[in-house]
Image (cartoon, helix red, strand yellow):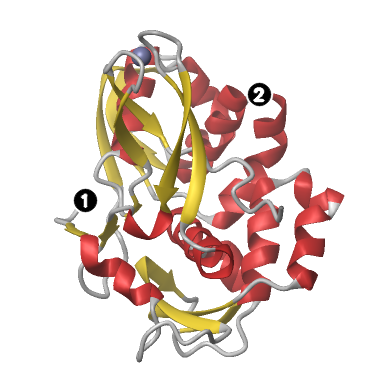
Amino acid sequence: MTTMDIDHDRTVDAVPAGGRTGGREIEVTLPVGYLDDQGRMHRRVTLRKMTGRDEALLADPANQRNGGRLVTSLLHSCVTGLGELSPVKRSDIESMYSVDRNFLLIRLRSFTFGPELPAGYTCPACAERFEQLEDLDSLPVRALPGEEPPEDIVVELVDGYLDRDGSVHTALTLRMARGDDETAAAPQMRKNASLGKNALLARCLRSLGDVPRHRLEALGSRILADLTLTDRRLIDRAFTENAPGIDLIRVLDCPACGHELRATLDLTNFLAMD
Ligand SMILES: [Zn+2]
C-alpha cells in the first residue's frame, strides 16, 4: 500500500461551501475514488438527502436479502453526481470500492438523520453491556493521496497454500473489494459469514505464488478454505489495517470495570428510519 494520511479534517467535506445550509445536497470526497471504464478517476460525489422513495428501497425484500444490492440501490438513488459522470449508472455504483461505498453510506446517514448514532458494546472482561452515543462525523478517514488507483494488498503467508504437487505458495496479492463482490458473495454470507468471506476474498484474489491464473479461478474459494487460521488472520489484518476509508475501530473504556476494549462500530440498522 502507498502511504496514506489520516485526515481528521476530511469531515469538513460533509459541509457544503458556505456551511450547512439546510439544502438537500452535499459534496464529499471519496477516500479512494472511482476509476471508470475509460481509466478516469472520480473522487467528488454529490449526495442528496434520503427521501420516502429510499425508505421503500430499504424495505424491499430483494434488497434486504442482499446487503450489497441494498447499498447499490440506495447509493444509486442518492448519488446525484460522481466526478464528471452524469447520469451516474447503477454499474458505476456497483464497481465502486466497498470502502468508498461505506464512506458514502455513513455520510448519507449523517446528512439525513444527523451524526449521532447510539451504538451498543459488550465488555469482554466483565460482560457489561453499555450504550454509547457515537459521532459519525468525527470518525477518522484515511484518504489515498493523489489520483492513482489503489495498489494491490500484498500478504506474505506464514503457512501458505499447499498445492496438489506438494509445492507451497506464500506470496498472496489481493485487490480491494468492490460493490459487485459484496453482491456476489451475499448469498453465501447470509448462510455462513465465514463461507461468505471466502467467496468475497476469492473474487479479490489476484495471485498466489506461482499458481497459474486459470487454476486460481478454478479453485476459487476452496483456496481460502484450505488456508490455516494463522494465514487467514494475516489476510484479515492486511485487508483492514491501514486500509483507506472510514476507520470503524473504536477504543473505549468499560464504564463498569475500566477495561479498555477495541470494537468495530456496530452499523447494524444504522439506517433505520425510526
Ligand atoms: Zn468491563
Q: Residues within 10 Å of mark 1 (few under 14, many from 20)?
A: few
Number of on-image labels: 2
Q: Which residue is mark 1?
A: 1
Query: Residue 136: x and y, percent?
Result: 42, 55
Q: Quadrant of residue 27?
A: bottom left
Q: On residue 236, which mark appears?
A: none
- Name the one closer to the observer, 77 or 26: 26
Tell us which disc is closer to us: 1 or 2.
2
Residue occupying the point 47% across, 54% down: 116
Q: Secondary structure at mark 1?
A: loop
Q: Amino acid at mark 1?
A: Met
Query: Residue 2: x and y, percent?
Result: 17, 56
**Would residue 23 appear left or right of 249 to someone viewing this image?**
right
Q: Specify which label sits upstream in the sequence, 1 or 2.
A: 1
**Would residue 100 appear left or right of 108 to someone viewing this image?**
left
Residue 17 versus residue 32 in the image, above or below? below
Query: Residue 160: x and y, percent?
Result: 32, 19
- Name the one closer to the observer, 101 or 37: 101
View extreme (front): residue: 256
Q: Secondary structure at mark 2?
A: loop
Question: Which corner quadrant of the figure contains ligand 1?
Answer: top left
Q: On residue 192, which mark appears?
A: 2
**Would residue 96 appear left or right of 170 to someone viewing this image?**
right
